Each structure stands twice: as C-alpha cells, then as structure tokens.
Image: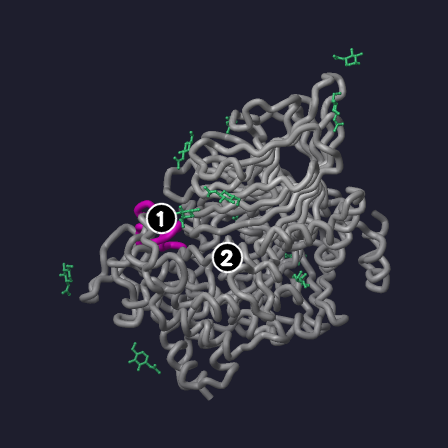
Amino acid sequence: MSNLRMATVLSLVVASHATVDYSQYVNVFMGTAKGGNRFPGVVAAPFAMTKLGPDVQNSTTDAYSGYLPIGNIWGFSMMHESGTGGAPKYGVVSQMPVVGQVSDPLADLSQPRLHVDEGGVGWYKSSLANGITVELTASEHAGLYSYTFPEATNESSSIVVDVSHVLPSFRGLGWEQHYSGGALKLLSESHYEGSGTYNNGWNLAPNWTIYFCGKFDQKTSSSRVFAQSNATNASYGQTAGTGRLGGVFTFNETKVTSRVGISFISTTKACHNLENEIPGETNPHSLIQDAQARWNQEVFNKIQMSSDTTEDLQLLYSSLYGMFLIPSNRTGENPAWSSGEPYYDDVFTLWDTHRCHTSLFQVVQPTAYEEFIRSLIDIWRHDGFMPDARSSNFNGRVQGGTNADNVLADAYVKGVRGAVDWEDGFSAMQTDAEVIPPLEIVDTKAPDASTKEGRGALPDWLQYGYITPRFTRAVSRAVEYSTNDFGLYQVAVGLGKTLEAATYLNRSRNWRNHWNPSATSGGHNGFMVPRKANGSFVSQNPEDCGGCYWGDAYYEDNTWIYSMNAIHDVTELKRRIGGDKRFVGRIDKLFELGIFDAGNEPGFTSPYLYNFVQGQQWRSVERGRNISTLYNSGESGLPGNSDAGAMESLLIWQMIGLWPMTGQSTFLVLAPVFEQMTIDLGDDKTLILSTSGGDRISAPYVQSLKVNGKQWDKSWVSWEDVFANGGNLDFVLGANKTEWSTGELPPSPASGEIQSVMH
Ligand SMILES: *[C@@H]1O[C@H](CO)[C@@H](O)[C@H](O)[C@H]1NC(C)=O
Ligand SMILES: *[C@@H]1O[C@H](CO)[C@@H](O)[C@H](O)[C@H]1NC(C)=O
Ligand SMILES: *[C@@H]1O[C@H](CO)[C@@H](O)[C@H](O)[C@H]1NC(C)=O
Ligand SMILES: *[C@@H]1O[C@H](CO)[C@@H](O)[C@H](O)[C@H]1NC(C)=O
Ligand SMILES: *[C@@H]1O[C@H](CO)[C@@H](O)[C@H](O)[C@H]1NC(C)=O
Ligand SMILES: *[C@@H]1O[C@H](CO)[C@@H](O)[C@H](O)[C@H]1NC(C)=O
Ligand SMILES: *[C@@H]1O[C@H](CO)[C@@H](O)[C@H](O)[C@H]1NC(C)=O
Ligand SMILES: *[C@@H]1O[C@H](CO)[C@@H](O)[C@H](O)[C@H]1NC(C)=O
Ligand SMILES: *[C@@H]1O[C@H](CO)[C@@H](O)[C@H](O)[C@H]1NC(C)=O
Ligand SMILES: *[C@@H]1O[C@H](CO)[C@@H](O)[C@H](O)[C@H]1NC(C)=O
Ligand SMILES: *[C@@H]1O[C@H](CO)[C@@H](O)[C@H](O)[C@H]1NC(C)=O
C-alpha cells in the first residue's frame, strides 16, 4: 500500500506501475445482486469473447448474466453479457458436473451451492452441495474447467455437455432465447466437437451458431451422445429441432480438467483457438496471471489515485473492471463478412453507454476505442446500419435515437482519427438521419416501426420536424433524434460539409417543436409533450408517462427528465424554462419530486446542468457527491443495472471530478474526490487532478481552480484544455458553497444563429 501513497509523487508514478497489482482490489461480484446484473465469471482480458461463469436457475428471476446470488447452478457456460437488462442473452456452450453415472441427462442436474461463489480477476470457483468443486479460468477464446469430485463416495465422475443449454427468460415478453438445433461428435475418448444454434433474445435475433471443441485431460470410462426423441438424426448427434442434445462423459478419476475452445467460424477454428490459447497441461495459475497482467496493463494502471483505503481502491478498480467486460472483441470471429476492419459485438446498448461511458472508454483505452469506432462503421458497410444495440452478430434493438451518431461525434470532436474512415463514418450517420429502416421484424411491444436499427420514426421527423403519436415513444425519440442530428452537424463541420452542417444543426433544434409552453407541473411551465399531425399538443400530466415503456410517449422516464436532454441547446432550454433562477429551480425539482433516478440513463446529465448558471457549480458538486453515495464495491453496490458499465463510468467521472457532454468537447467541472488522481492518456500524456483543503466529507465544494497553472473561473474545460495534450487541474476544496464559477458559461452550440456557426 505504501506504493500507492508514493504514487502521489509524480516521479514515482511510473515505478509504481510495475509493482502494484491493482487487480487484487477488484471485487468481481460488485453489482451482481439487486438488479445490477453484472457478470462475475472469468473474462481473461478486457472485451474477451469468452465469458465463462455459472448459470443459476431461478424460476422467477431472469439471470441476465447467468449468475444470481440465490438459486441452484445448472451449468457453467462460456458466453455471457454483463450488466444488461431486457432479457438474457447467451449462456451457451455449457457443461455440468455430476457425481456418479448419469442415467438421465435430461433430468434436472442442478445443484445448490455449498457456500457463496468466490472469484477474482481471471478465476472463479463454485462449491456445489454434492461435494464437487468447479474452478474456472480462461483465455480470450477458450476456457479451462478444473473439476474436483468428492473422493469419499467411490462413485465415478461425470460431466454433461448440454448443447441445448441457453439462458431462459421468464418475463413473458417474447424476448426469450430458443435453442434450435446443434451437433455433437465424439472424436476420441477425450475429444468432442460440435455446434449449437440459437435465436431470439432481446434483439429478436435470427438463428446464430457457435462452434466448440472440447478436450478432457483424462480418458473417459464411458461417453455417449444423448438427444431427445424428437430430435432428427439423433443417433448421429445432429439435431435440427428443439429436442435437447448433449453428451455424457464419465471418468474414474476425481480430478478432471476440461478445456473448451469456441468460435463463430467453425469447429476447426474452435480447436485452433483452444490449442493456441490453452494447450494441454496448461497450468490454470498461468492463465490467472496472464489475465491479471492484461487487466492491470490495459485498464487498471491507467488510473491511479492517492487514497490507500481498501474501500476506495476496491470501488475504483471494481468499477473500471465493470466498464470493459463488454462489448466483445470478435475480430477474426465474424461469421457474417470478412474485412480488414476490427469487429466488436455485444453492444448492449449505446443508448446506455453514449452518455458517459464511451467518452471514458476513449480516455482509458484509446486503441480499443478506435477499433470500436471502426467496427461500428464496418457494421454499417455490411449490414446497412450502425447498431444501437447488437449481439449474436445482429443489430437490435433501438430504444430511442440512433446513438451511434452521438458516439461518432464525440470521438470526432475529440480527435479520434487513426485508421477511421470518417467519410464513411459520416455516411453511416447520414444513413441513420435519412434512411427509414425497413420493418422486417414486427415487435409486438412497438409495432409502429423497426426497433432493429435506424430511426423508426424518421418519416415524421422528416415531414413535420417532430414525431406524432402514430409512433411509439414519440417524445423521447424526438429529443434523441435532435442530439443525433447534432452529432451529424459536429462531424459535418469537421469534414467541411457546410451544407450538411447547416441542415443538421437546424434539425438538431427540432426538440423545440415538442415544447408546449403551457404544459404545467410542479410549479413549472414548459415541457416536451406529444404533438399531433395538425400541430396541436396532446395535453397530459408531465409527471405521468403512462407505463414509460415501449408503447408510450416517453421511454423509461417522464418528460421532466426528457425535457432537460437537449444538452447541445441549453441556452435555449434555459430561456424556455424562464431564465437562470427558474432553471436552477427546475433541476432542484427533479430531486424534490423524486423524479430523478440515479440508476437510469436518461437523467444522467441533468444533475450537473447547474454549471450552465453562473456561480451555481457547487450545486452540481452536491448532487454528484450524493449520487456517489449510492455506490459501493459490494454485490449491491450499483444503484441500478450496470448497463454494460454505463453506471460504473458515471461513478468514475465523479471521482475524476468532470462530466462529459457527449458529442461535444466540453467537460463540466465537478470536484474530484481524491487528493490526487493521475490518468495515463497514452503517448506520454497525463492528466493530473489534485485537491487540497480538507477531507472529502467536510470539504466537498470548489473554492478555486487552476487549469494548467492558470486561475480558472469557468465551470467547464474542453478536451483541448486538459486531455488532448494532458494537463493539470488543481482544486482548492472547502466547506463553503463558493460561487467561484463566474466566467464564460459552457458552450451551447445549437443555440446561436445558424449563420454564426457556419463560417
Ligand atoms: C429467485 O431469486 C429471488 C430473488 O433473489 C429469491 O428470493 C428466490 O428465492 C429465488 N428462487 C429460487 C428458486 O432460487
Ligand atoms: C471406497 O472403496 C475403498 C476400496 O475399494 C473402500 O475401502 C472404501 O471403504 C470405500 N469407501 C466408501 C465410502 O464406499
Ligand atoms: C475405470 O474403472 C473400471 C472399474 O474399475 C475399469 O474397468 C476401467 O478400465 C477404468 N477405466 C479407465 C478409463 O481407467
Ligand atoms: C444423419 O447424419 C449422418 C452423419 O452426418 C448422415 O450420414 C446421414 O445421412 C444422416 N441421416 C439422415 C436420415 O439425415
Ligand atoms: C432456426 O433454424 C431451425 C432449423 O435448425 C429452423 O427450424 C427455424 O425455423 C429457424 N428459426 C429462426 C428464427 O430462424
Ligand atoms: C421435443 O420434446 C420435448 C420434450 O419431450 C418438448 O419439450 C419439445 O417441445 C419437443 N420439441 C419439438 C420440436 O417437438
Ligand atoms: C482485438 O482482437 C484482435 C484479434 O484478436 C486483436 O488483434 C486486437 O489487438 C484486439 N484489440 C484489442 C484492443 O485488444
Ligand atoms: C431550418 O428549418 C426551417 C424549418 O424548420 C426551414 O424553414 C429552414 O429552411 C431550415 N434551414 C436550413 C439551413 O436548413
Ligand atoms: C387537431 O386534431 C385534434 C384531433 O386529433 C383536434 O382535437 C384538434 O382540435 C385539432 N387542432 C387543430 C388546431 O386543428
Ligand atoms: C443528499 O442526500 C441527503 C441524504 O440522502 C439528503 O438529505 C440531501 O437533501 C441530499 N442533497 C442533495 C443536494 O441532493
Ligand atoms: C465561508 O463563508 C463564510 C460566509 O460567507 C465566511 O464567513 C467564511 O470566512 C468562509 N470561510 C472560508 C474558509 O472561506
């Protein structure tokens, strides 16, 4: 720990890189309970394709990541998502150990746990009630299961490989996955290969196939393929129906290791991945060391802070870990097309991550981020649209706007170039803005338009400049389409596309067309409301959003929240709300009325918009500090669904003391939590944040700030100020609600005259 103290001295920061194992502070169970849905199993490197962990049975609760704290384990499978909602995806390429012979592999083989599961970066361990211990380690495309069966029983040891195993959903919304066929071939006494095909899930995906190649370190005393009677060609282990399929492998030994490689391409590639990454005799400890080294080097070393309390260290590094479990780097594993571009799947979803996750992704992992941007564009090249969400190589689903536009804009204005083809990037964005996505799959929850990709309500957006109630989620989509169009404007400006820039800047203001100045709630006037084709507003209570779901006017939040979300046009928003004082009161009301939900993304930026009023920055700090108290590094430590790490990224920005305005180069200034934080920006650039003035509880508020040594009176900094070439932010904090932020307000780029931004 003394190393961490020394890390506050800049000259020693580099030395500490090599010596501190930050992975020891990761609680892989952070956010795995109470709906956090994080995946606690083995992810051997950031974005690794294999995510090996337990699948827990619970007939009432969906196990989104496979894991649940309560319930029996019914298999250990190799693919999962992390921190998602909607409906579970994956939970495939599974095996389950059984004591003794297995007479009926179709029976319930699940087991309670002897005690709570254990795990760390690179490893996982479950102890089952029947005495079997399962230890898991992995590489990027393969997994290693180490089984210890009970000695005392004198029984043989069995492993059931269940090709038909896939995570179920109990919500009854039609989003459950189905097994739809597979193959299993025994090649020798210790080697099998095969594939499983599955469909549906939250993104309503068609059939997709994963291939596997499994090898045991022991010879079987017996092995067989099983298939339900309704499976076709069952005797050959090939099925085309939903009849279950698998293999039973029985051993005399009590210690058995099982190595499995997976691939989207072929069983040959699955075997190649296996032998390449986990050859026979691989020591699990070497896999653990490799995993910890990669996470340290690629993620944890990038952010260091001065605190040496265990809770602080656990919170920072467990949060960083949770940010990079998905998407999955599937470069070289794309069955749909081959190209020289990187390929990332398991985008779940940009609706969640574009607000503050992707901007931190860029800072912490610039190389992977550039690959991710290229992958989004390559998906457009081959599938026609960029995804808002994507899994099993299939776009779907779109909750609001086409938020890849915001992500690309954010990357563009912050200088992401490298091998990104920005002309294609802009074309991909223009597809979102101009091409109505075909309605190929009718979603019963929202039958009005495609939820697969693109902007389903585009016909109205183009015709009226707003969205009529003939489209579901009309208002929440409209405000997102506005920010999406603002994204197009940003990239068009950079590429010198003057005409397009003017068009999309204009369109980015269309949120205003939903603004009904006489809608009233909580003493405030003016809200975004549904609007009919003839121009009349639909009158309704702004606190009421119906079910706040797919078929309603607002998705997952009401118009109090959505009316604050034109973050590219805040000056106009303030004007409509009634000026500075009313604007401050309006943000306060989100909290007073209990509307603000720290666990839901649409409201993420609202608490910090006080920075758009001179002197009021302290209020943003107060809100942010309060939101931070809802987090801890424990299993219930997330105030909502992790949402692919979106929730964790919010906390890390709080620790840093900045808030990204997605799609812009602006960061709102909050107040860092630690005395010192050092962020390695790559290319020998560093951002160093320091605070003085007291402890974080008694001295939360900014008294004064220096940016790169210069006294600062603005409530914001730009990418250029502190990230592009590194920088220093030195805060004096204190107990006083000091009105220090008297300088120029943060930019509101859509609020000026169009001409003034065109030159
Ligand atoms: C399912 O999970 C819930 C919530 O954790 C728990 O109360 C319940 O006992 C679990 N049911 C089973 C069958 O394990
Ligand atoms: C297991 O087998 C050994 C040798 O065959 C025997 O001595 C022992 O009593 C058996 N134990 C149990 C629990 O059956
Ligand atoms: C397993 O044990 C049985 C009975 O002891 C024996 O006949 C068989 O050869 C053993 N099989 C293997 C693969 O060791
Ligand atoms: C069953 O599968 C085997 C092996 O692939 C194949 O040779 C055979 O023709 C199949 N039989 C039927 C009835 O499809
Ligand atoms: C998936 O493939 C099976 C055959 O294996 C076919 O019967 C089924 O209709 C397909 N389902 C989808 C959703 O494509
Ligand atoms: C196959 O049989 C199982 C159980 O016998 C049943 O649940 C399943 O629906 C059947 N599948 C088909 C395609 O008939
Ligand atoms: C993504 O995967 C490809 C293929 O394995 C690899 O070359 C590339 O370095 C990976 N990207 C990152 C950021 O690790
Ligand atoms: C902006 O939109 C308005 C109507 O919404 C239209 O009259 C005007 O021509 C547009 N301006 C540009 C530059 O696209
Ligand atoms: C618009 O249409 C609605 C019915 O859909 C009607 O009640 C309202 O009077 C109309 N408003 C105008 C201005 O024509
Ligand atoms: C912060 O949280 C405390 C306790 O939950 C509450 O009393 C206080 O009003 C909150 N303050 C702000 C500014 O949200
Ligand atoms: C805090 O503010 C109060 C009232 O404005 C003032 O009297 C006091 O000196 C301030 N304290 C510090 C440490 O600036």
Residue 43's mark?
none
233 or 709, which is in the foreground?
233
Residue at 61 percent of width and 51 percent of height: 267
Residue 37: x %, y % from top left: 54, 42
Label 1 CB less than 8 angstroms from ligand 1 = no
Viewer-closest of 531 and 140: 140
Q: Which residue is mark 2?
A: 393
SS under mark 2: loop
The picture places residue 501, in percent across and down from the top left corner, at 43, 81
Main SS of the magenta segment?
loop
Q: Is residue 339 visible?
A: yes
Give the quarter of the image for residue 180.
Answer: top left
**Bounds of the magenta segment:** 544-561
Where, by quadrant of the figure, is residue 486 drawn? Answer: bottom left
Q: Callout 1: helix, strand or loop?
A: loop
Is 682 in front, or is 720?
682
The crowd level at tag 2 (other Cα within 10 Å; few <14, some 14-19, many 20+) is: many
Q: Is residue 697 left or right of residue 59?
A: right
Q: Is residue 722 magenta?
A: no
Q: Amino acid at mark 1?
A: Tyr
Is mark 1 in CB contact (under 8 Å) with mark 2? no
Which residue sits at x=64%, y=46%?
A: 213
Q: Which image quadrant is residue 135 in? A: top right
Residue at screen point 85% across, 52% down = 3
Q: Is residue 165 left or right of residue 446?
A: right
Residue identifier under label 1: 549
Q: Position of residue 33 (x, y in %)?
A: 56, 37
Which is nearer the eye, 653 or 403? 403
Disc 1 residue crowd, few under 14, some 14–19, many 20+, Cα 10 Å: some
Q: Is residue 592 visible?
A: no
Q: How is the image coloured?
A: one colour
